[in-house]
Amino acid sequence: MVGRVLAGHARRQGRDVLALTSSEWDITDPDAAERIVESGDVVINCAAFTNVDDAETEQARAHAVNTEGPAHLARACATAGARLIHISTDYVFSGTQRQPYEIDDEPGPVNVYGRTKLAGEAAVLAALPGAHVVRTSWVYEGGDSTDFAAVMRRKAAGEGPVHVAADQTASPTYVGDLAVALLEVADGAVRQSVLHAVNGGEASRFDQARAVFEAVGADPERVRPVAGDPKPALRPPYSALSGRRSVAAGLIPLRPWEEALRDALRAYRPGGPLPSTP
């Protein structure tokens, strides 16, 4: 999702884009990176094993994609003289604090996905100290996809109550806004190595679901809160990210999450793409 929207936005800006799927470029193959990356390239790694629950039972695959793959990319970029922007996650944090995580707060992932992503961050910066690691959170598109906002939009079109977890809080981030931030970093506007790129504010899944219902004209009272949503993998109960230091480093602030969500859903047309810019 991120790769598709990012590539589309970059092409509309007139950039020279080579966007490869996982079947065209398997990042777990170290030789592939060396064949593809060239001097002067800016590589934005949108590849990841993102199924948090499956990562618990497919640990070797999650490690290969989230840790070893980024390391291969970083080494290839270092050899070729290319730049690298690696996307990471709020799940590198434990969720034990109740204020947005800053860039240098102590990580402590509670699941395999988070641990492999944290190890990937370290591997990238070890192999290519000039690389950028961009953490984001709860990325959604809201269109004909399987992200949380899209699922809630479809449920809003139905009837009856919808039960949603109220004990998980993070920073919902619209993929189009994230793409804009990533291209800012690609243009060299930001020097900080580790960045947080999220829409402003924080929300629980319950808050986000109600906001989706309101945006599409459905009754938000149909959304009912539940606690302790059981899943194979633990989630950090609180993983909102602070963009304060990223903005200080030069990143343009992303707009509030409520505004981004409303615009994304209002712009949606069945069968058509969402806009990739605010």
Image (tube, rainbow, N blue to C red):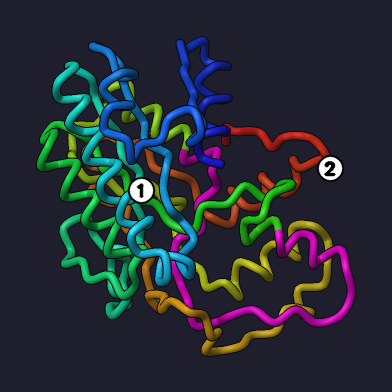
Spot occupied by residue 276 in the image (x, y as percentages of width and height): 59, 33
Determine whether, in the image, residue 104 is placed left or right of residue 114.
left
The answer, for residue 246, to whether it is visible in the render is: no
The Cα–Cα distance between marks 2 and 1, rounded to whole angstroms, is 33 Å
Region in magenta: 151-178
* Tag 1 secondary structure: helix
Q: Is residue 66 left or right of residue 119?
A: right
Q: Position of residue 268 (x, y in %)?
A: 76, 42
Query: Callout 1: 10 Å neighbours few (<14), some, many (20+)?
Result: many
Is 186 above or below relative to 220?
A: above
SS at mark 2? loop
Q: Mark 2 packing: few (<14 Cα in 10 Å), some, or many (20+)? A: few
Res. 238 image quadrant: bottom left
Kindly tell me whether residue 132 is visible in this rendering: yes
Report the front residue among 157 and 25.
25
Task: Give the residue pinned by disc 2.
Answer: 270
Q: Quadrant of residue 200?
A: bottom left
Please give the name of the residue rendered at 14% of the width and 21% of the height, measured from the top-left corner.
79
Please name which of the two marks, 2 or 1, marks the residue nearer to the observer: 1
> What's the mark number on residue 65?
1
Task: Decide which of 189, 81 is in the foreground and name it.
Answer: 81
Q: Where residue 73 sits: x, y (%)?
A: 26, 33
